[in-house]
Amino acid sequence: MPGAAATGPARVVARDWGWRHAGRKAWAVRDLDLVIEPGERVLLLGASGAGKSTLIHALAGVLGGADEGESHGSLLVDGVPPERARGRIGLVLQDPDSQVILSKVGDDVAFGCENLGVEREEIWRRVDASLEAVGLDLPLDHSTSALSGGQKQRLALAGVLAMHPSLLLLDEPTANLDPAGVAEVRDAVARLVDDGSSTLVVIEHRVDVWRELMTRVVVLDADGGVLADGPPDLVLDDVGQRLADAGVWVPGIPLGLAPRPVSGPSAAVITTDDLAIGRTRKQPVQEHLGLAVPEGAATVIVGPNGAGKSTLALTLAGLLPEITGTVTAAPQLAGRLGSRPIRWKSTELLTRIGTVFQDPEHQFVSSTVRNELGVGLQALRWSRTAIDERVSEILEALGLGRLAEANPFSLSGGQKRRLSVATVLAARPAVMVLDEPTFGQDRRTWLSLVRLLQHELERGATILSVTHDAGVVEHLGDHRILLEPLELGRRAA
Amino acid sequence: MSASTKISPSERAASRTLRWRVVDIVVVAVLGVATGLIFWAWNTLGSLWYAGASAVTPGFGGIAVGIWLLGGVLGGLIIRKPGAALLVETIGAIVSALIGNAWGVTTVYSGLAQGLGAELVFAALAYKRFGLVPAILAGAGAGAGAWLLELVMSGNLEKGVEFNAIYLGSLLVSGAVLAGVVGWALVRALASTGALSRFASGRDARREV
Amino acid sequence: MTSLTAADRSTVLHHRPPLDRVNPVTKVLAVLILSVPLLLTIDWVSASTAVLLEVMLFPLSGLRFTALLKRALPVLVFAPIGGISMLLYAKPGGTEYLSLGFVRVTDNSIELAVAVTIRVLALGLPTILLFARVDPTDLADGLSQITKLPSRFVLGILAGARMLGLFIDDWRSLALARRARGLGDRGVVRRFASMAFVLLVFAIRRGSKLATAMEARGFGAPNERTWARPSRLGRADVVAVLVTIVIMAFALSTAVLAGTFRVVGQ
Ligand SMILES: Nc1ncnc2c1ncn2[C@@H]1O[C@H](COP(=O)(O)OP(=O)(O)OP(=O)(O)O)[C@@H](O)[C@H]1O
Ligand SMILES: Nc1ncnc2c1ncn2[C@@H]1O[C@H](COP(=O)(O)OP(=O)(O)OP(=O)(O)O)[C@@H](O)[C@H]1O
Ligand SMILES: [Mg+2]
Ligand SMILES: [Mg+2]
């Protein structure tokens, strides 16, 4: 028999529920009273740090025990604590990088089904079906360690979809996907819940993508409890403005950002000549690139998942060596150093080209948020007071002030992203290379980030962002670079 | 964290279960892999040292062995569950053997014996004490385990009493210092980064913010 | 989409080198058979015979000669170390060639030193022969399905051990990150030490999160688990065990016939 998945959609009941993470004084979620009926499709909204991920982890029963934090009230899935209903619940975590479990794509997708006790033939059928549903077109024995950010996210989703869970929980499942991928994933989820066999809870800042599919919107209040709850149209239309002020991306409410002045052609600050790039020398992901990054302007790199955008960004930033061809920095940037950024020393790079990695955790080097921001400045031998001043200023601007002493790794997804962008902003480099600088941001934090970046532009900085975010393209995309993936055949050659 | 308390929080018997969580299992494997890499890196240097010391003295080669005993101490101190010391040391040995070293399968037998030595020390302390002294004892215990196994496995029975006595002494010292003290310091450093926040061993370093 | 269904997988098997058809669990058993008797005895004839027979089996492993040599290099280089210690400190017996404090080189110690050195080779080769091409996932499948070890542990450890493959990648990206953050200019030794520590921290964090991800996919659920990849024993496994038993029996009996057979400590 196909295992526990056959028992129909789950019902969720929270009574006065709350959770406080170990090491935190504040409760992440508080005073939550919520009933989700079987088969409902809930879009869970709320500001960055409001406790959405915490709640969804609790629903999946993976929040842990007394070592991990303190709970209050009760939270039940079909009448039992979620840990005991584990086999019927599938969760896609916010961070795609940490969810790869096995070393081959097929095995990884099969893992969840195995845990549920699904029959072998059926497992492989489901594996093929869900890989196709999420649009991950890779052989089953492809290695899971050489995937781009978006590919990893699709893989994680396929693994959970294949479980056919009674309660399907998705934490920002499309944050790293290209627009086509977003639609693909949404449709895959829609097909799965179409017959009403699963209850669905999705966290996503971008409301418009999911609005049609959902039967209900729940907005978590950062101060505890629920801010709004009801059918999507009702909630978003009636109290839209209030929600927007609280950070929710309500469609149709203008951002209030001034349009970027149309800039004339400006000199290039970084150019490439017949450039081939790749993580390893043997496998170029792009070839024959002749690009120019204009000085003092905002440029975006766009393109589908796996096209090599991150690889290009790292190469332009002087972190990955070119495979063939060259990256050349203009004299006004290079100064008396050589023209190739890859040859510069680390501290020389710091004030010239700053880089934000796609995965924020890769770039954290300290054990508190405050130190994290100070590291680069210390390397530049700023004075203590100057560092403190600059750090406090940025912390406040990005809403991280209360978390100054927290460990960077314990932050929420959106907070991590802001911190990693802040580490680059702190040193005020002449060129900033930002890989997906805005993913996971609520409306308010998004606006403060974009304003900060625009402010840097006005100061004369050059900004190069890799992004799937249409808002970034609009507000930080004076110039655009489109990357299309090399065909697989050519890449292998 | 006041320095005046008699029993440090890390040694306090916590009211927790000895049941293995999934995170315990996975992190045991991660630690095993990491120590396997340390072993492997130490293989060349350590065996040259061993050979050098053996050539000039009978049995003092054991002084170089301590680093190979690190796994048991790390596993026991971090995970604090029955079997953790044995598992980490054994996985480390397997990794070292699979990457390729001079001793093949016998590495794995060594890992088992050394891990068991450390494990028995933690068991004797009822899995309740994890300070510096238990770490040193566990390191020495691992050394004793190595010594017992090598009586047969390296044919040390064929050597004289002097050799084996000196060898035991140097193994105990090396285990206590290079595995015990070093392991303890390493766990402290790990805890201070916040990486052990999901473990009892990381709770002491945690501040509320 | 190029996809391998369960049925395709078994057909692929037949094009692989013979040793790949042996279940990893059988290989564990084979290594035990090939090592334990040698560990309990110490003589150069049985060890040499074992080495010779093992070398003859190498074509079955599918390893290229250069790969084999690369893997066997540490064994060859370090094999004499155990021998030296034995040469100098074994209990004296027969003619004495050198005596210096504790050091006594005698007929007995020379014989033992040679035996120990060859034995290191005999013990080192099977691991390379049998495990150079084993996929950890297959081993884990075998350990849970055939030897019935608790799957929670086997799979948890498998998932954690996969980090080994990520270490090189992580090392690279952490190095990039430190360069980007202005910490890349320190001296080589300091940088190496601090990177190694950071890597350990990172691996533990990854492991902790991986555990959550596994639970999020129903790992540790109370119901019975199924297996997407069957792990079976077949004729190849029987043959493999028989061959190893024959090798060992042959090696030991040659030693007995040659009169060199000797149990450790006797
Ligand atoms: N493991 C943890 N340890 C300590 N504090 C944590 C941990 N995880 C989250 N927090 C804190 O709990 C609060 C809620 O975090 P959570 O991840 O639930 O937010 P979120 O609503 O998902 O935000 P985002 O939209 O940015 O992902 C935040 O202030 C965060 O810093
Ligand atoms: N660490 C790695 N090792 C080997 N190959 C990798 C690695 N990371 C990515 N790749 C491969 O390189 C190609 C380009 O990856 P890259 O991360 O640059 O894509 P991307 O355009 O940034 O995609 P995304 O929008 O999903 O982030 C992908 O096909 C991916 O499979
Ligand atoms: Mg979140
Ligand atoms: Mg990318």
Image (cartoon, coloured by chain):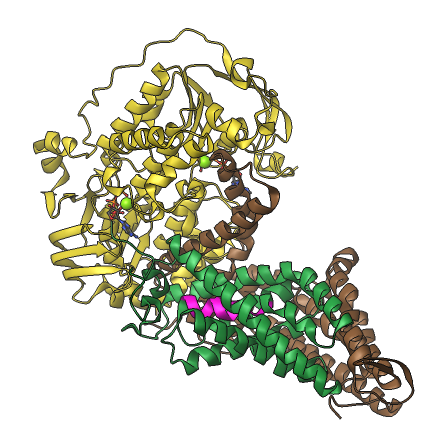
Chain colours: A yellow, B green, C brown
Q: Which residues are magenta?
A: B68-78
Q: Is residue B2 visible?
A: yes
Q: Position of residue B138 (x, y in %)?
A: 49, 75
Quarter assignment of residue A235: top left
Q: Residue furthest top?
A: A264
**Residue B72 lies in magenta, yes or no?**
yes
**Above or below: residue B48 compared with residue A295:** below
Q: Position of residue C133 (x, y in %)?
A: 65, 62
**Above or below: residue A384 compared with residue B198:** above
Camera-nearest residue between A251 and B15: B15
Quarter assignment of residue A20: bottom left
Q: Is residue A338 left or right of residue B183?
A: right
Q: Residue furthest left?
A: A238
Quarter assignment of residue B146: bottom right
Q: Residue at x 75, y 63 (%)?
A: C72
Camera-nearest residue between B69 and A277: B69
